[in-house]
């Protein structure tokens, strides 16, 4: 559309934590770059890895689990096998039962994101699947990476 400016990619320092992911041969699509669906796997993996490492999530035993209810992603530059990708995360909005994470994907040593997006978890009781307030430890971990 005329007059619409393209979103500027975020920078490395716009995020609070992260982890490295190595692209795999089968991540590439026929166009020679990582398929867009793979980016969402990386988003989810980076956030859950962070929560597990911080002791705020036990994927087999936690009474409270996060269910994804909303996602989005913008693509700025291609990523392809055999790239190393740093997935950087932050908390953009922290509610009583939900959190919106911001995620940036950085190729190699680049400080400008190749892609950026967000997703929202609603935290629910594992058994009833009903929304439940964030446990104190989880809230503290999330506050530590809030913007």
Image: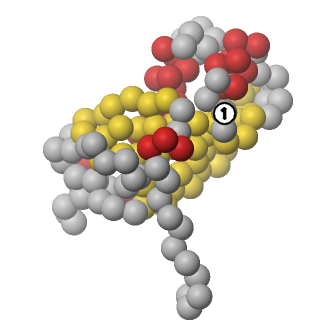
Q: Is residue 92 left or right of residue 87?
A: right
Q: Is residue 3 above or below residue 108?
A: below
Which residue is pictured at 19% across the width and 61% down the height?
Answer: 32
Q: Is residue 132 above or below residue 121?
A: above
In this view, the residue farthest toward the bottom is 2
Q: Quadrant of residue 144?
A: top right
Which residue is pictured at 61% across the width and 29% down the height?
Answer: 145
Residue 147 visible in the current orientation: yes
Q: Is residue 73 above or below residue 19?
A: below
- Which one is nearer the viewer's eye here, 147 or 83? 147
Q: Is residue 17 above or below residue 51?
A: below
Residue 41 visible in the current orientation: no
Which element carries disc 1, helix, strand or loop?
loop
Work out which quarter of the rendered image holds the C terminus and state it: top right
Q: How many marks?
A: 1
Q: Residues within 10 Å of mark 1 (few under 14, many from 20)?
A: some
- Which one is nearer the viewer's eye here, 22 or 61? 22
The percent position of residue 138, horizontal first and vertical second, equals 68, 18
Work out which quarter of the rendered image holds the N terminus and state it: bottom right
The percent position of residue 120, horizontal first and vertical second, equals 65, 42
Which residue is pictured at 55% across the width and 78% down the height?
Answer: 5
Q: Is residue 82 left or right of residue 145?
A: left
Q: Is residue 60 left or right of residue 88?
A: right
- Which one is nearer the viewer's eye here, 89 or 68? 89
Residue indicated by mark 1: 146
The percent position of residue 55, horizontal first and vertical second, equals 56, 10
Which residue is pictured at 37% across the width and 47% down the height?
Answer: 111
């Amino acid at each position: 559309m005329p007059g619409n400016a393209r979103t500027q990619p975020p920078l490395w320092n716009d995020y609070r934590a992260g982890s490295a992911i190595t692209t795999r041969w089968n991540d590439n699509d026929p166009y020679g770059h990582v398929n867009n669906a793979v980016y969402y796997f990386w988003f989810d993996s980076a956030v859950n890895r962070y929560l597990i490492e911080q002791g705020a999530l036990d994927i087999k035993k936690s009474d409270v689990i996060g269910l994804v209810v909303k996602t989005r992603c913008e693509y700025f530059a291609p990523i392809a096998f055999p790239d190393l990708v740093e997935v950087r995360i932050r908390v953009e909005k922290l509610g009583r039962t939900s959190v919106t994470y911001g995620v940036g994907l950085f190729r190699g040593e680049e400080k400008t994101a190749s892609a950026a997006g967000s997703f929202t978890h609603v935290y629910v009781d594992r058994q009833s699947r009903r929304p439940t307030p964030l446990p104190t430890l989880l809230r503290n971990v999330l506050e530590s990476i809030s913007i």
